[in-house]
């Protein structure tokens, strides 16, 4: 178990994260927040690259900075910016990293082929990476994070730059990896975590806004999300009255999905989705809407 207790991080006078307390058991945790919210900062603390200003982080009850090398032995990490060598093949690259990690040569060989199998790159194991797609490179990145068979796998924006097909494949692979370990993955794209994360963590105003299952998070907007059709000329006023989640124009009418506090006869009530909560939670604070539950 990995635990953060009242962790605060300052960069000089600037507070990036404040009083963060989180627990990770096993499964996939989706750290979901817009850019600049503090995801990378949080992840860098969990990977011992940044030291918390206040609070502590414990693995199996012991401070991770005290565990030091022993903690990093159980940790796999894919940074947001990950460097690889275009002229290397995945096997060459991973053997090189394994050597840096001090993994013995014979053991390393077996591990390299094992992880390439896991990320479905075995058939290109000896091809130079310069011809790889974004998705394939990301899978090499995950392979390097898996080299030590980590109990904790932390991936910072692993789906950035992937096409939709690669995203689906990536999601399937992750849920498979997460069966017996902690997987923490950060993203600002709702659809990347909604089908695989056991729990979602949202950060807002430097603090944890939600940490819960998707079902429970969506429950917050239950009975408040509607769909209806709005005439073209009424749309400006409609937007002023309601927080719209999506708008689709068709034949002089708009099909809108929106939030309102109580139903109306010509509105269809719909089940809230994670995307709805995300849009609502991070709506521009300047905007004002006629919704009575601004804090959900
Ligand atoms: N080394 C740093 N020095 C100063 N400010 C930083 C540093 N790293 C991040 N920040 C600031 O902290 C905030 C959170 O950044 P970051 O953790 O990268 O967010 P995210 O990964 O969610 O996009 C941002 O306002 C960013 O500018
Ligand atoms: Mg980041």
Image (spheres, rainbow, N blue to C red):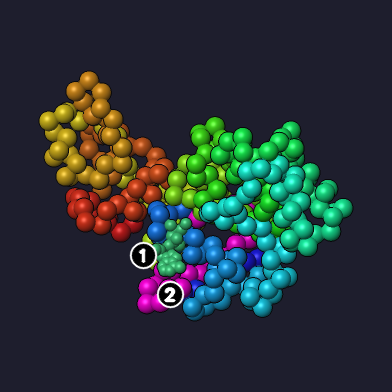
Secondary structure under the numbered disc 2 in the rendered image:
strand
Q: Residue at x 65, y 40 (%)?
A: 129
270 left or right, relative to 19: left
| Residue 44, image quadrant | bottom right
Task: Return the residue nearer the eye: 247 or 154.
Answer: 154
Horizontal and vertical percent position of residue 48: 60, 69
Is the residue 153 above or below the residue 89 in the image? below
Is the residue 192 above or below the residue 124 in the image? below
Q: Residue at x 21, y 56 (%)?
A: 286
Tell which residue pokes out farthest to the top in this image: 251
Horizontal and vertical percent position of residue 173: 64, 41
Magenta range is: 9-31
Q: Quadrant of the C terminus?
A: bottom left
Tell which residue pokes out farthest to the right in this image: 106
Q: Residues within 10 Å of mark 1 (few under 14, many from 20)?
A: few
12 left or right, relative to 225: right
Label 1 near ligand 1 (CB < 8 Å): no
Dominant secondary structure (helix, strand or loop) of the stretch shown in magenta: strand
Residue 281 visible:
yes
Is the residue 61 above or below the residue 189 in the image? below
Residue indicated by mark 1: 205
Residue indicated by mark 2: 10
Horizontal and vertical percent position of residue 78: 60, 54
**Residue 192 falls within the magenta-colored stretch:** no
């Amino acid at each position: 178990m990995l635990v953060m207790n009242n962790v605060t991080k300052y960069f000089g006078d600037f507070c990036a994260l404040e009083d963060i307390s989180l627990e990770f058991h096993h499964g996939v945790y989706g750290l979901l927040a817009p850019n600049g919210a503090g995801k990378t900062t949080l992840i860098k603390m969990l990977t011992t690259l940044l030291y918390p200003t206040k609070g502590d982080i414990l693995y199996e009850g012991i401070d991770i900075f005290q565990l030091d090398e022993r903690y990093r032995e159980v940790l796999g990490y894919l940074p947001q910016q990950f460097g690889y060598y275009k002229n290397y093949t995945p096997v060459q690259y991973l053997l090189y990293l394994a050597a840096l990690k001090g993994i013995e040569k014979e053991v390393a060989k077996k591990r390299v082929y094992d992880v390439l199998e896991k990320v479905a790159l075995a058939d290109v194991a000896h091809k130079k990476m310069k011809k790889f797609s974004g998705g394939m490179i990301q899978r090499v990145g995950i392979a390097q994070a898996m080299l030590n068979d980590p109990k904790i796998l932390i991936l910072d924006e692993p789906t950035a730059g992937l096409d939709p097909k690669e995203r689906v494949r990536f999601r399937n692979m992750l849920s498979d990896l997460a069966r017996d370990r902690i997987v923490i993955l950060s993203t600002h794209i709702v659809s990347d975590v909604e089908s695989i994360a056991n729990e979602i963590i949202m950060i807002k105003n430097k603090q944890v806004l939600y940490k819960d299952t998707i079902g429970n998070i969506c429950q917050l907007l239950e009975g408040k999300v509607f769909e209806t059709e709005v005439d073209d000329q009424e749309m400006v006023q409609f937007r002023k009255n309601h927080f719209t989640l999506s708008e689709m124009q068709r034949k002089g009418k708009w099909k809108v999905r929106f939030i309102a506090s109580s139903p109306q006869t010509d509105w269809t009530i719909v089940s809230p989705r994670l995307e709805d909560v995300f849009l609502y939670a991070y709506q521009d604070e300047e905007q004002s809407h006629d919704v009575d539950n601004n804090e959900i």
